[in-house]
Image (cartoon, helix red, strand yellow):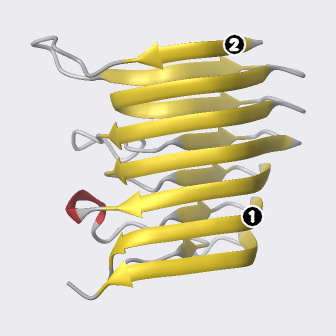
């Protein structure tokens, strides 16, 4: 279990932390009650099974020109991953990204989009990955892609989706 953690905005001249948590080969791990500000990416799970991410609040994920950064949650080659109560504001990349045949369930998430988010999908499932999402709220500026399969056999199913965006 990893929990009750707060990462504050970086004051380092080298810039932001690349990853908040990188978990590889994790089984049955719970990450909970995390607040993170000004990071590269939030939680990245790879080769993992049956893990839970709960109460993750991410304020500003910057990609610094690196496509794999700017994400609140990233899963790769992982199964049985559950995210509950995710809040993500101003991610410069895709906020939730599943790749390489991953299976991800999201139960409650709020995404606040800003100018930095322009052109990025809120959620993306690529390379035969699946995302099942319920109770999702998207607010902020309009003109964004909500979901993307990357043209590579990914699937996203969303229920109880609320979108409240401004036109400019």
Report, in whole angstroms, how far the alpha carbon at label 2 lies from the one at label 1.
23 Å
Above or below, 74 against 164 in this view is above
- SS at mark 1 in the image: strand
Q: Residue at x 78, y 12 (%)?
A: 1
Above or below, 78 against 6 in this view is below
Q: Residue at x 72, y 66 (%)?
A: 135
Q: Label 2 crowding class (10 Å Cα cut-off): few <14, some 14-19, many 20+?
A: few
Q: Residue furthest bottom?
A: 167
- Quarter of the rendering occupied by the C terminus: bottom left
Q: Label 1 crowding class (10 Å Cα cut-off): few <14, some 14-19, many 20+?
A: many
Nearer-the-camera pick, 136 or 18: 136
Nearer-the-camera pick, 110 or 16: 110
Q: Residue at x 77, y 54 (%)?
A: 107
Residue 52 shows in this picture: yes
The residue identified by callout 2 is: 2
| Left or right position of 7 against 83 | left
Identify the mark at residue 133; answer none if there is no mark.
Answer: 1
């Amino acid at each position: 279990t990893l929990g009750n953690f707060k990462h504050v905005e970086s004051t380092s001249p080298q810039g932001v932390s690349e990853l908040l948590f990188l978990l590889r080969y994790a089984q049955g791990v719970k990450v909970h009650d995390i607040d993170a500000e000004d990071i590269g990416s939030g939680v990245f799970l790879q080769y993992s099974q049956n893990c839970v991410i709960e109460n993750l609040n991410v304020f500003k994920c910057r990609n610094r020109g690196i496509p794999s950064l700017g994400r609140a949650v990233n899963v790769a080659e992982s199964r049985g991953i559950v995210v509950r109560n995710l809040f993500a504001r101003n991610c410069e990349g895709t906020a939730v990204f599943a790749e390489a045949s991953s299976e991800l369930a999201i139960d409650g998430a709020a995404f606040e989009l800003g100018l930095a988010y322009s052109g990025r999908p809120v959620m993306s499932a690529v390379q035969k990955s699946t995302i099942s999402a319920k109770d999702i709220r998207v607010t902020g500026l309009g003109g964004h892609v909500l979901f993307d399969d990357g043209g590579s056999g990914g699937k996203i199913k969303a229920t109880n989706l609320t979108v409240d965006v401004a036109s400019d």
